[in-house]
Amino acid sequence: MNYLEKLKAKTSHPGELQKLQKDVEPENKPTSPTAKTAKTPFYPFCSDRGSLISENHPPTAPTKKRRRQKALLVTPAMVKAWRVGRAWILDHLPELQQAGWTRAELLRAGRFQYPCGTWGAAWGDVWLKPGATVAIEEQGAIRWTWLNETGRPITQAMMPK
């Protein structure tokens, strides 16, 4: 004998039984619309009116993001200039150190693209200028001198810190 049959036997009024039955066995109707019963929203960009875009166009596999190619800090031309500059600097290192230069100041590579940052004198592109002459001045500056296309003399200097 289940619970409702026991209650029928105990109660004499049929109205009470119906009231108890509603409390014991509630109807299994959803109070809010579920995904299946709810009306789909209208999207003006959808080709099929009244249906979800995701139903018409299944999601595709995510594409792999391409990594941005990093700019080279050291280019092949800079390596050529460094080899020429390093050879000259190592030959004149005692003179440069007496003038106030350190080996790190002369040969170091910077953290940012040239000429931004703290690049040493060996990395400059002036080492590859045709006809350039290099001299150490009294104040310790390294001075490059060359002639441009019109024959005008151009000078560039770098001072120790």
Image (cartoon, rainbow, N blue to C red):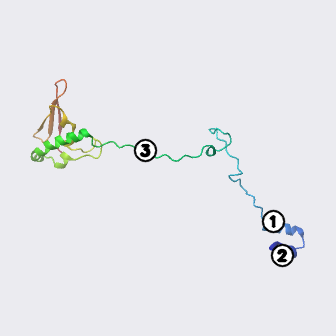
Dot placed on the residue nearer the N-terminal end, 1 or 2: 2
Residue to which mark 2 is pinned: 6
Residue to which mark 3 is pinned: 66
84 with respect to 43 (left or right): left
Give the mark toward the camera: 1 or 3.
Answer: 3
Give the mark toward the camera: 3 or 2.
Answer: 3
Name the amino acid type tagged 1.
Lys
Instruction: Look at the numbered disc 2 and give the secondary structure of its residue.
Output: helix
Name the amino acid type tagged 3.
Arg
Distance CA(mark 1)–CA(mark 3): 62 Å
Q: Is residue 10 above or below residue 94?
A: below
Q: Residues within 10 Å of mark 3 (few under 14, many from 20)?
A: few
- Splitting the image into 4 quarters, where does residue 127 fall? top left
Residue to which mark 1 is pinned: 22
Distance CA(mark 3)–CA(mark 2): 73 Å
Viewer-proximal residue among 100 and 54:
54
The percent coordinates of residue 130 (x first, y second) are 17, 31
Name the amino acid type tagged 2.
Lys
Distance CA(mark 1)–CA(mark 2): 16 Å
Instruction: Look at the numbered disc 1 and give the secondary structure of its residue.
Output: helix
Q: Which residue is drawn at the image coordinates 49% and 46% (left, top)?
A: 63
Query: In the image, which disc is placed on residue 161?
Result: none
The percent coordinates of residue 125 (x first, y second) are 22, 37
Instruction: Look at the numbered disc 3 and give the secondary structure of its residue.
Output: loop
The percent coordinates of residue 114 (x first, y second) are 27, 41
Dot placed on the residue nearer the N-terminal end, 1 or 3: 1
Viewer-proximal residue among 126 and 56:
56
- Splitting the image into 4 quarters, where does residue 76 fall? top left
Q: Are marks 1 and 3 in contact (CB under 8 Å)?
A: no
Quick check: can you spot residue 106?
Answer: yes
Q: Which residue is drawn at the image coordinates 23% and 44% (left, top)?
A: 119
